[in-house]
Amino acid sequence: MIRTTTLGDLTALMQIETNSFDRSSFAMSRQNFIYHINKEAVLYVYEADDTLAGYILVFVRKNSPKARIYSVAVKESYRGQGIATALFEKAISYAKETAKDTITLEVRADNENAIKLYKKLGFKTQKRLKGYYPDKMDALTMELFLNL
């Protein structure tokens, strides 16, 4: 089941976050989650077996034609089950509902599994950002153009 998050999800979100990312990847804090939930963003969570198995954080601005995937993560024990794909499909649907024509994201250039998934979903690499992450790893910016 995919639903929007509640403040009661914060502990589970933080567990997924700390197990999925390290400081070299801009891992989010509890305060970051609270801030983004209360701003121009939507945070969807995926529940499986009464467990929060993953999330996707999408930024949407009222006057922008673009949505931005800020972060996505799936609990390690649930990876490979299509959860990230389902979360992306929900985010894409939301972007279309809010009349966005493009979804953008950044991904570590060495995150081959994520890049493969994003390409499968139709994202195209736009450019490389040299030294983007705190550990100086490059990022790729990717875009998905929506047919509204």
Image (cartoon, rainbow, N blue to C red):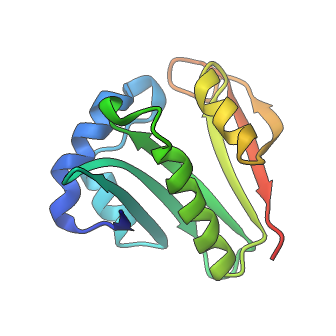
- Tell me which residue sits at (68%, 41%) in the image: 118
The image quadrant where one finds the C terminus is bottom right
- Tell me which residue sits at (32%, 38%) in the image: 17
Tell me where residue 114 appears, x and y as whole percent: 60, 32
Residues 84 and 140: in front is 84
- In the rendered image, the vertical position of residue 75 relative to residue 51, given as above or below: above
The image quadrant where one finds the N terminus is bottom left
* Left or right: where 42 falls relative to 111: left
Tell me where residue 139 appears, x and y as whole percent: 67, 30
Q: Count of labels shown?
A: 0
Residues 9 and 85: in front is 85
- Tell me which residue sits at (45%, 68%) in the image: 42
* Left or right: where 54 falls relative to 86: left
- In the rendered image, the vertical position of residue 78 relative to residue 35, given as above or below: above
* Left or right: where 56 falls relative to 97: left
Q: Quadrant of residue 138?
A: top right
Tell me where residue 39 appears, x and y as whole percent: 42, 72
Residues 58 and 90: in front is 90
- Tell me which residue sits at (16%, 49%) in the image: 11
- In the rendered image, the vertical position of residue 12 relative to residue 42, given as above or below: above
Tell me where residue 92 appears, x and y as whole percent: 64, 64
